[in-house]
Image (tube, rainbow, N blue to C red):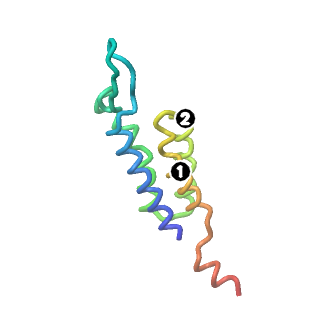
Amino acid sequence: MRTKLTALSFVLAVVAAVFASVYPIYSGFKGSEPFRATLIEVNGMWAVAPVTVPVLIAAVALVFRKQAVRIVAAIIMGGFSLIAMSVGLLYLPAAIVMLLAACVADGARLRDGAR
């Protein structure tokens, strides 16, 4: 169950990164014309680096299947979600699922230990 939740967190982080990169989240006016632009159009290609940080953190938690790694990943992803408010809120579902992956008990241990 933990691995499935960690994988789901990774997928949610990838979806958030792609969405933040290609969806026009900036809007305004150029003269009297409405203007919409993506994160990359406004900030350039360097904006890809901060967007991929939660994806890399979720990937590390998926590769190294230790409880401590999941806990640290949940803390870092949650902090990123709250600190980088505009784009970071897109990663909040991934951070919540990673927190669940860090806190949920393993189903086999629960089943075997209940007797």
Q: Amino acid at mark 1?
A: Ala
What residue type is disc 2 on? Ile
Q: Position of residue 93 (x, y in %)?
A: 52, 50
Q: Which mark is residue 83?
A: 2
Q: Label 2: few (<14), some or many (≥20) within 10 Å?
A: few
Which residue, as the protein is rendered here, is positioned at the far top?
A: 31
Query: Residue 95: which numbered mark, if any?
Result: 1
The residue lying furthest to the right in this view is: 115
Question: Judging from the image, what secondary structure is the residue with disc 2 in?
Answer: helix
**Mark-to-mark CA distance, 1 and 2:** 13 Å
* Lower position in the chain sequence, tag 1 or tag 2: 2
Q: Quadrant of residue 39?
A: top left
Q: Residues within 10 Å of mark 1 (few under 14, many from 20)?
A: many
- Residue 16 position, x and y percent, is 41, 46
Q: Are marks 1 and 2 in contact (CB under 8 Å)?
A: no
* 99 relative position to 27: left or right: right
Residue at x 47% of width, y 56% of height: 9
Q: Residue at x 50, y 34 (%)?
A: 84
Where residue 97 appears, as percent x and y from the top left, is 54, 57
Q: Residue 114 lies in what quarter of the image?
A: bottom right
Q: Is residue 30 left or right of residue 62?
A: left
Placement of 84 over or under 98, stated as above or below: above
Which element type, helix, strand or loop, lies under badge 1? helix
- The total of numbered circles placed on residues is 2
- Where residue 27 sits: x, y (%)? 39, 25
Tell me the residue at 59%/76% (across/down): 107
The quadrant of the picture occupied by the C terminus is bottom right
**Residue with the most extreme bottom position:** 115
